[in-house]
Image (cartoon, rainbow, N blue to C red):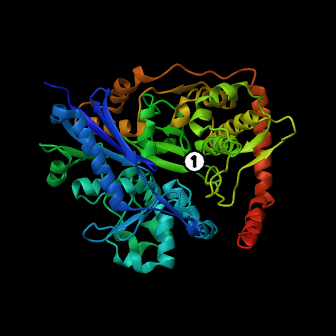
Amino acid sequence: MQEQIFIGIDAGTSHIKCVAFGSAGEELNSTSCNNEYQTLPGGCVEQNAVTTRDSMLSTLKALIGNLGSDAERVVSIAVTGMGDGMLLVDANGTPLHDGWLWLDSRAADTVAQLEQQTNYDVIFNITGTSLNASQMRCQMLWLNDNQPQLLDKAHTAYHWKDYLYYCLTGVRATDPSEALFTFGSFQSGDYSPEVIKALALTDRAHLLPPIVDGMTQTHPLLSDVASSIGLSKPVGVTLGFVDVICSAMGGGLYNNGALSAMTIMGTTGIHMRYAGSADDIQLPVQKTGYTIAFPGGGYVQLQTNMAATLNIDWILNLGAGVLKAHGHQINVDTLLHTLDEHALKAKPGAALYHPYISSAGERGPFFNTSARASFDGLDQSTAYYDLVRSVIEGMCFAARDCYQQLGEIPAEVRLTGGAAKSVAVKTILASILNRPVRVTELNESGAAGAAMIATMQHGVYDSLESCAQTWLDDNLGKATLPDSSLVPQYDELFTTYLASRKNKMSNGIWEQLSSINGKYKQTNL
């Protein structure tokens, strides 16, 4: 009997990836395409749902074409995608608007108001998740207050992967991860009427789709979709958990049920700890972060900061732009190629950098839409690559800041995301956390995690332990150890990092800058 093939789809913010895996985790083929969005005034960040659907299908079709006759061995397609955001559709499944992304910040004032109400305690304690403008519940509440007519027309409110699942199967569904941290109870595993009431959205509860656990349930691929992408036989479709959870699975967070930690350093920074049961959850006193269901009955507690590699993109673009302005033909890819060499030679702690470079501000381990990046401690000896190293250090201090809200850091931290390829990032992160950092060599961890769920649903594995052992044990790279000469310096710098950040917050520095810039923005055009 020929080996079965499982396809994982990861519809991310910037790219849609379709990857074919063998049942033991070997990558057989992959395709990808750009996933475009637009940034609009007022903090609006939107994406056209029909374009996203068509891009997914064309990318999936290309993968099937690449597989050739091996496409007959495809038994399942699993889909995951970017978290948060919202897309409203009518009773026919037709999108009513361009969907909102997790980058959208128009609901920031709504969040600020709700956090001051006593209902916030109810919401946080039941969902285990703090509020921020990126979430469907906050975006829905904003619409309820500002554009209720759009909600009146809607039949279903989807997260992005849920809409793509609908396009593949015609089934109205969401998964446990996104359902529970937005509108549910992490202890009961179902929607919470008490949470929905506290959000003042009881009249909109009918918009929430049924919860489908991809570990135990699947639905058939629509026949017309199968024909359009080149599949000649029926296959099942698995609804994966949200991309951060699938990436955690594919990146090695699950370690046979042991307490483990993982950082995803992509455009954003995501820092998480695994908990085996609801009884192991200890909610932060500061009421920050997420508590998200993990396949197989576990949970992940995580903190997210808005910008990780976005900071590196900024500092490298800045350097390339200056050189180009002076007639030097150099691009960002060239600077990125030499990043490790120059950053590791640069002076540690040459400046203290707060990595809040996103125009949406910060959301973890604190929420402030006015938060902005800054350098402290510059002098005339500070060179360009000193700044680059400081930016990387700032990203890693932000990771430690997030972990500090989650309790003690476990003995080892797994790392995935684009920055996991950087020796400088791995070395500095290990030294700032004072923990070994290990990277999985399994490519496309998000698509891999979704496909892993499908293999378990399909009966290839009888437990998460056996699946993780087969897919991941041989793909874990060598650990990057902390640099003992840097650990004491970074410990002291982290204390100063926190003090500086808290000073800016308590004195309203960011809000003052935002007010001044807003006042003079038009007159300086």
Can see residue 346? yes
| Vertical position of residue 3 compared to residue 503: above or below | above
Pointer 1 local density, CA inside 10 Å: few below 14, some 14–19, many at least 20: many
Query: Disc 1 marks which amino acid?
Result: Thr
Q: Name which quarter of the figure residue 326 lies in.
A: top right
The residue positioned 15% from the left and 32% from the top of the image is 69
Quick one: SS at disc 1?
A: strand
Instruction: Please tell me which residue lies in front, 477 or 231.
Output: 231
Q: Name, please, the residue furthest toward the front.
A: 327
Horizontal arrangement in the rendering, residue 322 relative to residue 418 (left or right): right
Screen quadrant of the C terminus = bottom right
| Vertical position of residue 137 compared to residue 260: above or below | below
Q: Name, please, the residue furthest toward the right.
A: 380
The residue positioned 54% from the left and 63% from the top of the image is 122
Instruction: Please tell me which residue lies in front, 394 or 330.
Output: 330
Residue 392's x, y, as percent? 67, 36
Residue 170's x, y, as percent? 22, 58
The residue positioned 40% from the left and 20% from the top of the image is 474
The residue positioned 56% from the left and 63% from the top of the image is 105
| Vertical position of residue 188 compared to residue 256: above or below | below
| Label 1 sits on residue | 304
Residue 138's x, y, as percent? 51, 66
- The total number of labels drawn is 1
Q: Name, please, the residue furthest toward the bottom.
A: 149
| Vertical position of residue 255 compared to residue 316: above or below | above
Residue 360's x, y, as percent? 61, 58
Horizontal arrangement in the rendering, residue 135 relative to residue 386 (left or right): left
Q: Name which quarter of the figure residue 510 lies in.
A: bottom right
Screen quadrant of the N terminus = top left
Can see residue 216? no
